[in-house]
Image: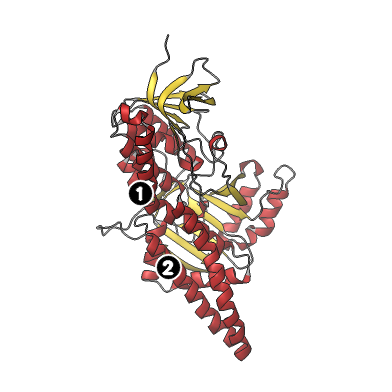
Amino acid sequence: MATPSYDFIIVGAGVVGPALATNLASKGKTVLMLERDLSEPDRIVGELLQPGGIQLLEKLGLGAALDGIDAAPITGYEVIYEKNSVNIPYPPPPHQTKPAVGKGFHHGRFVMNLRRLSSETEGVTLKQATVTEIIEKDGRIVGVKTKENPEPYYATITCVCDGTNSNFRKQFVQTRPVVKSHFVGTILQNPDLQAPGHGHCIIGSDFSPMLIYSISPTEARILCNVPMATLPSKGNGDLKKWLETNSLPHLPVPLQKSFAKALEDESQLRSMPNQYLPAIQYDVQGLIILGDAMNMRHPLTGGGMTVGFNDAYLLSEALGRLSSDELASHSHLQIILKEFRRHRKGSSVVINVLSIALYHLFAADSPELKILQVGCFEYFKCGGEHIRGPASIISALTPSVSLLFYHFFAVAFFAIRLNFVSKIKESGLLGFFIAFYQMFTTLWTAAGVFLPFLFKELLY
């Protein structure tokens, strides 16, 4: 029996794969989606969807994926610095008056809904299979081989969406993700959150940042930054000891008890590398790489799924209009991909650069970054546009490179001004000269944690 051929094969059915498959199939394309393991995943990534991501999910026809999974509403952020706090609510979406809402949830439940809804779409075939090889013939990718089926699967276009640890990315590109820290997470039961319904970002001058957000009405995920490329051992208890020493004491007192209790069950500790991968360049006939396989950012701002859904929407809208002959034409496909790369930057550049810049400020491992960290918190405390602008960016409701640039460097100059006031108050004229010197080093540091990443993202 001949193996059927499809318009698209999608390798990976995590978050981006089902979104891409669903929208392509809604436009009459036939899609085979292959996933190594169709059981419910248990991961600490992809648990927070920003309001802009929810809008994209609805545009993709997958809004129902948030139903029936005990998703918790997220209405903004509470930033806690040295026991002081500032509330950052999400603004209303454009042309609306009601404040926007994000969602926190168990990643696995969300993914299972995405897979179910996608597989129920006419034109989508979902199979559990491990892809072992991407088939190339006469310089073009024509399909895949799997461990389970002796016969290859063929398609006009093969899309690699196999996530952060992509098995096939390295086959086609030389760029590797950069890992400088890890998030270690567990679940807090019935935590006493300072601002229920908000993500909590806990930062300080002498400890690594922590992020807490609800994933159900009774549970919250806590993610503790461990600023190491290699984690302490979980097996011998070193990881637990590190968290007890370096994270637990810096939590708000009402949360310390629930975190200490969660640490008693070390089997529940999950970790993930905080990876950065600028959007990769490749030119392979018949191949598209998408999602975290193509582009990663720091997870601090919870923007990864929003970028993924935006990419899936833009690409499927463009590819869905093509005829079979146009899909098979490499020159035609390259035009589409060039337009896709240009259009995606409006959202991806902002979300990616924001995640890296905020992480550097919140992790603050140098005197200049500590100056910027204080300045950022005090900037938020000013309220008004000092909150509305950053909130509209982090929520992905109105991503704007110019707005991000403006607020980032507004924070930098505000921080420098505060440092002048502080140093002069402490040391008089000597303090002025110290602050004058730090003005230049702080600006240089600010530019160094913003501009290189901005250029990398824009050049793709």
Image location (x, y in percent) of residue 48: 45, 48
Mark 1 or mark 2: name the one nearer the start of the chain: 1
Q: Is residue 34 left or right of residue 335?
A: right
Q: Which residue is pictured at 49% across the width and 15% down the height? A: 151
Residue 38 badge: none
Element on which disc 1 rests:
helix
- In this view, the residue farthest toward the top is 1
**Front-most of 22 and 257?**
22
Q: Name which residue lies at 33% across and 40% down.
A: 63
Residue 390 position (above or below residue 47): below
* Circle number at residue 343: 1
User: Dot 1: within a 10 Å radius of its alpha carbon, few (fewer than 14), some, or many (20 or more) residues?
Assistant: some
> Which residue lies under the disc numbered 2?
407
Q: Residues within 10 Å of mark 2 (few under 14, many from 20)?
A: some
Amino acid at dot 1: His
Report the quarter where the N terminus lies: top left
User: Against 426, is 185 above or below?
Assistant: above
Residue 179: give x, y in percent of width and height. Answer: 61, 50
Q: Position of residue 34 (x, y in %)?
A: 47, 27
* Residue pictured at 69% horizontal, 44% vertical: 234
Establish if 252 lies above or below 239.
below
The answer to whether residue 205 is visible is: yes
Residue 184 showing in the rendered view? no
What kind of residue is marked 2?
His
> Residue lying farthest left?
95
